[in-house]
Amino acid sequence: MATVKLLGDEELSSDAKAIFDDIKAARKSEFVNNFWRALAHDPKTLRRTWDSIQEVMRPGALDPKTKELIYIAVSVAHGCSYCIHSHTAAARAKGMTEQEYAELIAVVGMAAETNKLVTALGVPVDEAFLADCADPS
Amino acid sequence: MATVKLLGDEELSSDAKAIFDDIKAARKSEFVNNFWRALAHDPKTLRRTWDSIQEVMRPGALDPKTKELIYIAVSVAHGCSYCIHSHTAAARAKGMTEQEYAELIAVVGMAAETNKLVTALGVPVDEAFLADCADPS
Amino acid sequence: MATVKLLGDEELSSDAKAIFDDIKAARKSEFVNNFWRALAHDPKTLRRTWDSIQEVMRPGALDPKTKELIYIAVSVAHGCSYCIHSHTAAARAKGMTEQEYAELIAVVGMAAETNKLVTALGVPVDEAFLADCADPS
Amino acid sequence: MATVKLLGDEELSSDAKAIFDDIKAARKSEFVNNFWRALAHDPKTLRRTWDSIQEVMRPGALDPKTKELIYIAVSVAHGCSYCIHSHTAAARAKGMTEQEYAELIAVVGMAAETNKLVTALGVPVDEAFLADCADPS
Amino acid sequence: MATVKLLGDEELSSDAKAIFDDIKAARKSEFVNNFWRALAHDPKTLRRTWDSIQEVMRPGALDPKTKELIYIAVSVAHGCSYCIHSHTAAARAKGMTEQEYAELIAVVGMAAETNKLVTALGVPVDEAFLADCADPS
Amino acid sequence: MATVKLLGDEELSSDAKAIFDDIKAARKSEFVNNFWRALAHDPKTLRRTWDSIQEVMRPGALDPKTKELIYIAVSVAHGCSYCIHSHTAAARAKGMTEQEYAELIAVVGMAAETNKLVTALGVPVDEAFLADCADPS
């Protein structure tokens, strides 16, 4: 499938190659997955996406494994098979246990169900849920 | 809005009342939010949904706050405004800090962007992501 | 809200007015709901949409009430609040009972849950489900 | 694909095996489709999902075939290829004719189109659609 | 996959054949892609869909290439792999350059990200965005 | 609604204020819409989002108006009411005529319909659509 050719290392523009070098250095691995090889036709989006992912996924108030769980949840909700596979692999690499995985998808499924029940019924937001939004400081 | 009347405590069938009593007992509060008041027309679905939520959201390999973060992520991806508000409130009640919240929505947004880039490009799943799926035991 | 003005009967172009006359005649009512009043800025899409809806929703192998149940299900899945409200009203007008409605949304919720479990797990389609597709005649 | 191994009958835990026995008994068949084989890693979710499906899909005010039509509609709206294939097969097994199937997907397509027109235009819900929601008893 | 057999030219009903003849004439080509071969089981929907596409996609205030860009964007947002591939091919056939394609998917990805940030935060619509909607004439 | 307080100019952190100054300078206006006021709690995401939008939406192979049309299409597909309103206003400000707008939403609706027909039928991608993907250079 794919709407563009997946670029091999020897087919990269010099701009794309520089970003691939960053990816390899950051991951301490020569393996660069297909997403980046498809995106490599457009070094500008490749650069912006790589930099943004680095900024968003680095350890912060949330640890990297939890961020991967959230990434999987969104990818499932959007039905992106590639992203589900890549981030499930990433989460496992970051220590996600099979028990955590089982609970993750149970929550995702449950949320999908109540999302649709709520949407079908057109339930108005309770005032109580708006109360503490005033100042998140 | 709402496609059904939100039922007050005095309008509940005896089956629905019994479940509301469970909800109040579990939450140690008289407050029952609108979702349950809309669902209360159908005690069977009310019962099944409440029991399922209890089973899915209880502490396990993942703690309740992390489960709420995942619930918010799915609700955002599905665009369920009610669920976003109720589970954002629930996550805060379970200790989600504003910094954690900021990182959560940054991950959700980032995942949405790469989900769509991947989908647009039709990127095939790397074999490496399939490798360790053989036996999660 | 609305990105265009909802047109009153006296603001219609002659092309749009002709279609509104068709709608009123078909429904035996002077009431024309907001969807058509928003669409009335573009008589070509108004005409095509009205004609298509008439063709699709008329009694056939499936009765009109069942078609409305399906319409609600899709509208819930897509999160279109207007469509949910208008087609829930339409289904009730065509005889949908509250028990049927309760079962409808239970199925919608259940389907959403298993859709997401399947998607998360990347389950491959069983050969058995492909077997009888050869010739639907 | 699949993010977990599909479990064969001989690989099931005793908890999972008990549920598979229920599935086989209920369906009067030794065939258990891939969805359950993927879910079998987590007997708790396997049990809850099987029980919920049984409760939701059993004959009620809506007959089982109509419930399958609704299930297909939701699965199409969510883009779950596995679910589309499995429930289209199930609907045919429950008597869905090709004419009913043709009308089903015509309604699903039409709903998708008007859902998006309404959403684009931001059409506000007519008061008339809210009028009869007061008490569904 | 496919839930119905893709019909060859020699398997068409006379109604379906007439529409295939229209498609071939309009495209000045004997090639009819799989979408129409799946839809050919239902000549009524085949006819309505072909006629609607012709009306919607013909040159107007927007040129055909721009319409294909929009078609791709929607297909990506809905995760329809077939449609992404067919309309990306169509857009290229209508002159879409690889630079235009790169910018298209960058916008699609960006929109997905801000869509989700906005949805997560529940941002209310600014009055300024409602101001000029009064009369688009 | 909103899950966080919309920040007024006087409530901004110095980091957020610097970005608001950039926004005002770029737009030559004191008006900063609610999206940025909600995002202002997190200067890091505020900065990254603003910079990314500037990069993605600037004139390139596609003109800014066409980019806004695409942005609207994605926002409609995702059902983001805020984004639909803000980008419809932006597109009009960049010269979108009402005729262009009418054709835009006709294409969005049509795409939604055929997306779902294709998905329901599980149509496999034609080889012809894969042929020219080899090298987009």
Image (cartoon, coloured by chain):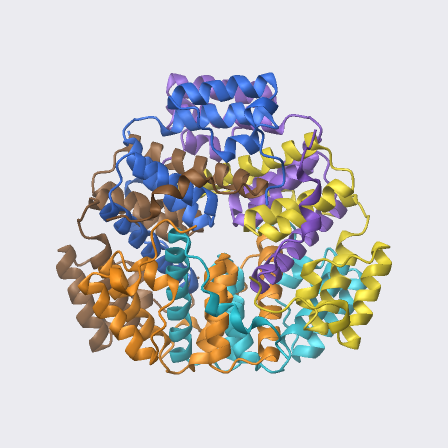
Chain colours: A cyan, B orange, C blue, D brown, E purple, F yellow
- Give the image location of residue A124, x and y in percent: 44, 57
User: Is residue C20 shown above or below F100?
Assistant: above
Tell me how many marks there are.
0
- Give the image location of residue D136, x and y in percent: 27, 48
Left or right: where does residue C84 sit relative to residue E111? Answer: left
- Give the image location of residue F3, x and y in percent: 56, 67
In the image, D81 versus B108, the foreground residue is B108
In the image, B115 versus F29, the foreground residue is F29
What residue appears at the point 37 percent right and 29 percent down from the top-left corner?
C57
What residue appears at the point 67 percent right and 39 percent down from the top-left corner?
E133
What residue appears at the point 33 percent right and 66 percent down from the top-left corner?
D38
Q: Quadrant where the N terminus of chain F lies? A: bottom right
User: Is residue E31 shown above or below E102?
Assistant: above
In the image, A133 versus E73, the foreground residue is A133
User: Is residue F74 shown above or below E26?
Assistant: below
User: Is residue D121 shown above or below E7?
Assistant: below
Say if residue E37 shows up in the picture: yes
Left or right: where does residue F60 sit relative to residue B16? Answer: right
Say if residue A73 shows up in the picture: no
Say which quarter of the image contains residue C112.
Answer: bottom left
Left or right: where does residue E113 sit relative to residue E32? Answer: right
In the image, E82 versus A4, the foreground residue is E82
